[in-house]
């Protein structure tokens, strides 16, 4: 099917400030997941997956441990998921996921990114219906037919499987991550996932031309500079 997707990992920026922002985003997400689902990665598979992804993205161990230790206290910030969407430069579609302890502040910050690039934030559902919300698992060394059989036997809502250069990519419903990984582990043992994420994937891509290219880069940079922003999904291709 050739679905286009990108890892959520940030491109590891060359400046220390940019790296610090990446570490901060991981630290906040690890804190929230540990606080809500338990501190033990063996019993909190979401936390385990997040820690593995953080390590692959070269997040220092002390950042991970500090976030988990902070969650152990129980008190502290109460972050909640906030999702915004709208039309960006060149009429592209964008979904911005945030973890925030102050939704009013975060909404204002995100809206300003749209305003400063002469675009407009939309209402909930304004563009998300043009994205598929999917679990993505990418791994090597398994037979496609055997993988599909094991997932179907476990009643996993499999949307698609791609097989490219010895790597299988499973696309399933966004709520199916735990069930899919459990089925794969029972069938094949521990798997080293190259990608283990839940993403919004655009159903159609839109190319940008002219001044819209520069404006889109500015739009993305402004959003990525916001502490509360965790993930940005768009249909620019």
Image: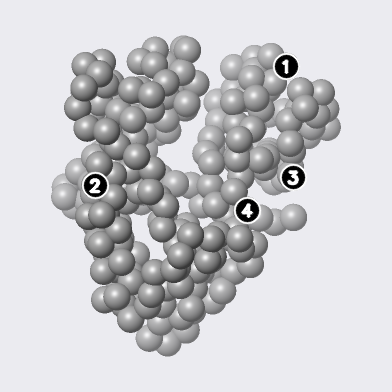
Quarter of the image holding residue 182?
A: top right
Select label 1 or label 2 by which is in front: 2
Q: Distance between the Cα atoms at labels 2 and 4?
A: 28 Å
Residue at the image point whose x is 49% and y is 21% from the top = 45
Select label 4 or label 3 by which is in front: 4
Q: Distance between the Cα atoms at labels 1 and 2?
A: 43 Å
Q: Could you tell whether 121 is left or right of 156 in the image?
A: left
- Way the structure is coloured: one colour
Q: Are marks 3 and 1 in contact (CB under 8 Å)?
A: no
Q: Are marks 2 and 4 in contact (CB under 8 Å)?
A: no
For label 2, the residue is 102
Select label 3 or label 2 by which is in front: 2
Percent of width and height locating residue 237: 54, 68
Number of disc labels: 4
Q: Distance between the Cα atoms at labels 3 and 1?
A: 19 Å
Percent of width and height locating residue 4: 60, 57
SS class, disc 1: helix
Viewer can see residue 19: no
Q: Residue 187 carries which label?
A: 1
Quarter of the image holding residue 68?
A: top left
Q: Which residue is outermost to the left? A: 17
Q: Mark 3 or 1 closer to N-term?
A: 3
The one of 218 and 96 positioned closer to us in this rendering: 96
For label 4, the residue is 132
Residue at the image point whose x is 47% and y is 26% from the top = 46
Q: Distance between the Cα atoms at labels 3 and 2?
A: 38 Å
Q: Say if 160 sits above or below 235 in the image.
A: above
Q: Which residue is outermost to the bottom? A: 210
Q: Mark 4 or 3 closer to N-term?
A: 4
Q: The N terminus appears in which quarter of the rendering? A: bottom right
For label 3, the residue is 160
């Amino acid at each position: 099917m050739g679905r286009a997707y990108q890892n959520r990992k940030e491109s590891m920026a060359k400046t220390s400030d940019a790296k610090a922002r990446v570490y901060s985003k991981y630290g906040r997400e690890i804190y929230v997941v540990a606080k809500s689902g338990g501190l033990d990665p063996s019993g909190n598979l979401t936390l385990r997956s997040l820690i593995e992804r953080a390590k692959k993205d070269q997040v220092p161990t002390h950042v991970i441990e500090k976030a988990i230790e902070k969650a152990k206290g129980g008190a502290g910030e109460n972050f909640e998921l906030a999702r915004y969407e709208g039309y960006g430069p060149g009429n592209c579609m964008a979904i911005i996921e945030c973890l925030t302890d102050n939704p009013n502040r975060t909404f204002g910050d995100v809206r300003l990114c749209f305003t400063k690039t002469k675009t407009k934030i939309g209402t909930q559902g304004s563009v998300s219906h043009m994205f598929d919300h999917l679990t993505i698992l990418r791994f090597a060394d398994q037979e496609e037919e055997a993988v599909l059989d094991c997932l179907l036997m476990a009643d996993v809502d499999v949307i698609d499987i791609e097989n490219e250069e010895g790597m299988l990519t499973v696309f399933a419903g966004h709520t199916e991550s735990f069930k899919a990984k459990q089925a794969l582990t029972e069938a094949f043992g521990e798997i080293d996932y190259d990608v283990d994420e839940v993403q919004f994937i655009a159903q159609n891509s839109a190319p940008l031309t002219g001044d819209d290219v520069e404006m889109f880069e500015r739009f993305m940079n402004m959003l990525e500079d916001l502490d509360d922003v965790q993930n940005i999904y768009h249909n620019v291709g």
